[in-house]
Image: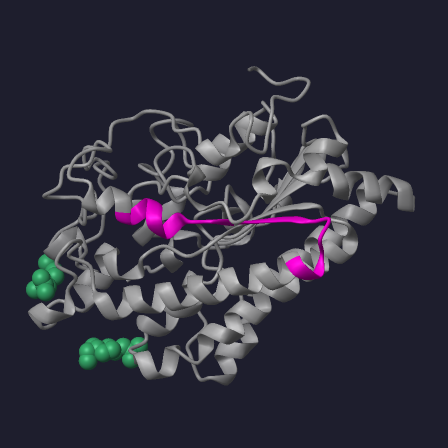
Amino acid sequence: MYLRGPAEAAARLGPPRLAAALVAGAAAADPPAARATGGCYTRLFAFGDSLTDTGNFISYSAAPGPVARLPYGETFFHRPTGRWSDGRLIVDFIVERLIGTPYWPPYLAGKTAEDFRYGANFAVGSATALSQGFFEKKHLNVDQITPYSLAVQIGWFQKLLAMLASTDNEREEIMATSLFLVGEIGANDYIHPIFQNKTFGWIKPVVPLVITSIAASLEALIRLGARTLYVPGIFPLGCAPRVLFLFRGSAPGDYDLATGCLRWLDDLVVHHNTLLKAKLADLRRAHPGVSVTYVHYSGEVLDIVTSKGRHGFDERTVLDACCGGGLHNANFTVHCTEPHYYRIGLRSRPFVPAAFGPGTIGCFCPGSNG
Ligand SMILES: *[C@@H]1O[C@H](CO)[C@@H](O)[C@H](O)[C@H]1NC(C)=O
Ligand SMILES: *[C@@H]1O[C@H](CO)[C@@H](O)[C@H](O)[C@H]1NC(C)=O
């Protein structure tokens, strides 16, 4: 079985939309950085896992597996790019909207300052918020867990910042005018243990550690001068096809009636997101000049799952993977190597996350196509 973090599971749910739904506090309506720069962000820096990885994993992995083959990439780029999707990721739409250029390299594929003139993407498929070493100490098999956890990605950012800015003024300018998308991150901290048969009792105490780790990374960015940070929560793991397959045969009462998803896992997600939101509120209080916005991925996915066809998904197959075999098309031993991926009836329409539209936090910057 080739399990690559939440990536496939999430991609199979369809792209969760980043919507205006989440915005905590007034921060997003009038972020300080947007004021400071006339409403434009000059760069976007993103951190996370396979929901956001646009090519880091594929550029270092000696055996990247299916993501290096069609149908990954087939509908938009017409070749595999290292995205765990047939098309663009949420972050691609944000880049298009905010920066107006597709030229935005994954960190590991760039070299010069010019390569990073619009920022960089540090996200890596299978990445965790906690370090790989943490899971090793807890006796997990870490073959499927990248060493490039969130803290490592923040370290990469620091190196890049040193390359982009030679003076304190330059550094402050870059930090104040950039948008930071930190996450989604953390789902893999639970998914890896889940797929290694760890129980809820094993996983639940990990949640506060994950939140502490995410907060430490946010603090590090804020200390460096970040003014505008978007922090997505995790999505409903109990709705992911592979998880539904793994726990097939659960008692009827284990499933949420409205969604068909596994309740105990969705409770874990709610727990994570609740602690995350509380931590973000602490950060806002501690750093009044900084805009920290929670992004409600989970609500977006649940909306797709429960909205009976409104988003272009067929309600009968909305919890199914787009190809493969067995329950929810998620039998681990039936591989989707044939080009029939991601065809669950999601209409191909570019989605521009509402939270990133003009008048909320972003605008079209010079050089944009808008
Ligand atoms: C998890 O449990 C299943 C069923 O008991 C078993 O087949 C599988 O090998 C176990 N996986 C791990 C990583 O222990
Ligand atoms: C998964 O697929 C394999 C190979 O086709 C098959 O032998 C197995 O019975 C399937 N398992 C389930 C639970 O459907």
Ligand 2 quadrant in view: bottom left
Q: Is residue 349 above or below residue 9?
A: above
Residue 115 in sight from this viewpoint: no
What residue sits 43% from the left and 81% below the top? 205
- Residue 313 position in % (x across, y down): 19, 36
What residue sits 82% from the left and 38% below the top? 173
**Is residue 202 found inside the magenta-colored segment of the image?**
no
- Residue 191 position in % (x across, y down): 36, 66
Q: Is residue 304 above or below residue 206?
A: above
Q: Quadrant of residue 107?
A: top right
Q: How is the image coloured?
A: one colour
Relative side of 9 to 306, left or right: right
Relative side of 147 to 21, left or right: right
Nearer to me, 63 or 111: 111
What residue sits 26% from the left and 61% below the top? 238
Nearer to me, 85 or 345: 345
Relative side of 91 to 3, left or right: right
Nearer to me, 171 or 290: 290
**Is residue 288 found inside the magenta-colored segment of the image?**
yes
- Residue 40 position in % (x across, y down): 68, 28
Q: Which residues are magenta?
A: 285-302
What residue sits 38% from the left and 25% below the top? 350
